[in-house]
Amino acid sequence: MALTVKQIENAKPKDKKYSLSAGKSLFLVVSPAGGKLWKYRYRIDGKASEYSMGSYPDISLAEASEKVLALRKVVQQGVHPEWHLLKLFRVTIFNDFFAGQIPGFSE
């Protein structure tokens, strides 16, 4: 059964943190303090890892599902999501810096 927005909103804190599966290795962790954090579970070279994507309601169920689809493609290439996003960040900073420094520079 797929996770619904109503189930997310009705998820109440318990004594220990627990998770609600949304399918496709996406799940929502509910903390004892009441915070709700999206996580993506993946495996590269036989080693299981988790990637935190942000909190609910800042990231909706639909947005989290879209992010997982993109991250699954990255993981299928054998790249950890953190490394991929760091590379994208560095390229953006590099391009933004040189675009203002060198006349005629563009991506």
Image (cartoon, rainbow, N blue to C red):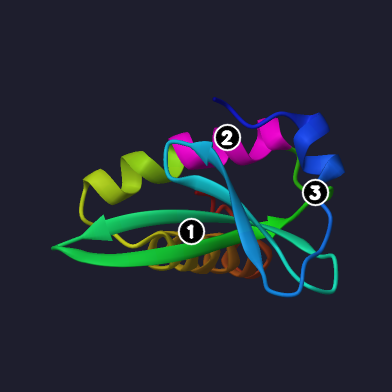
> Between tags 1 and 2, which lies in front?
2
> Between tags 3 and 1, which lies in front?
3
Which numbered disc flags the more N-terminal residue, 3 or 1? 3
- Classify 10 Å Cα crowding around label 2: few (below 14), some (14-19), many (20 and above): many
> Between tags 3 and 2, which lies in front?
3
Q: CA distance from mark 3 to mark 1?
A: 34 Å
At x 48%, y 60%, the residue is 85
Label 2: state its secondary structure.
helix
Residue 16 lies left or right of residue 45; in this view the side is: right
| CB contact under 8 Å: marks 3 and 1 | no
At x 67%, y 69%, the residue is 17
| CB contact under 8 Å: marks 3 and 2 | no
x, y percentage for residue 11?
Answer: 80, 48
| Amino acid type assigned to the residue bearing label 3 in the image | Ala
Label 3: state its secondary structure.
loop
x, y percentage for residue 61?
Answer: 70, 36
| Amino acid type assigned to the residue bearing label 2 in the image | Ser
Residue 73 lies left or right of residue 66; in this view the side is: left
Q: What's the magenta bit mostly, secondary-structure-wise? A: helix
At x 57%, y 33%, the residue is 66
Which numbered disc flags the more N-terminal residue, 3 or 2? 3
x, y percentage for residue 87?
Answer: 43, 65
Residue bearing the label numbered 1: 88
Label placed on residue 65: 2
Corner quadrant of residue 25: top left
* Count of residue discs: 3
Q: Is residue 90 above or below residue 24?
A: below
Residue bearing the label numbered 3: 11
Whether residue 95 is visible, yes or no, is no
Q: CA distance from mark 3 to mark 2?
A: 18 Å
Bounds of the magenta segment: 61-69
Q: Is residue 47 above or below residue 26?
A: below
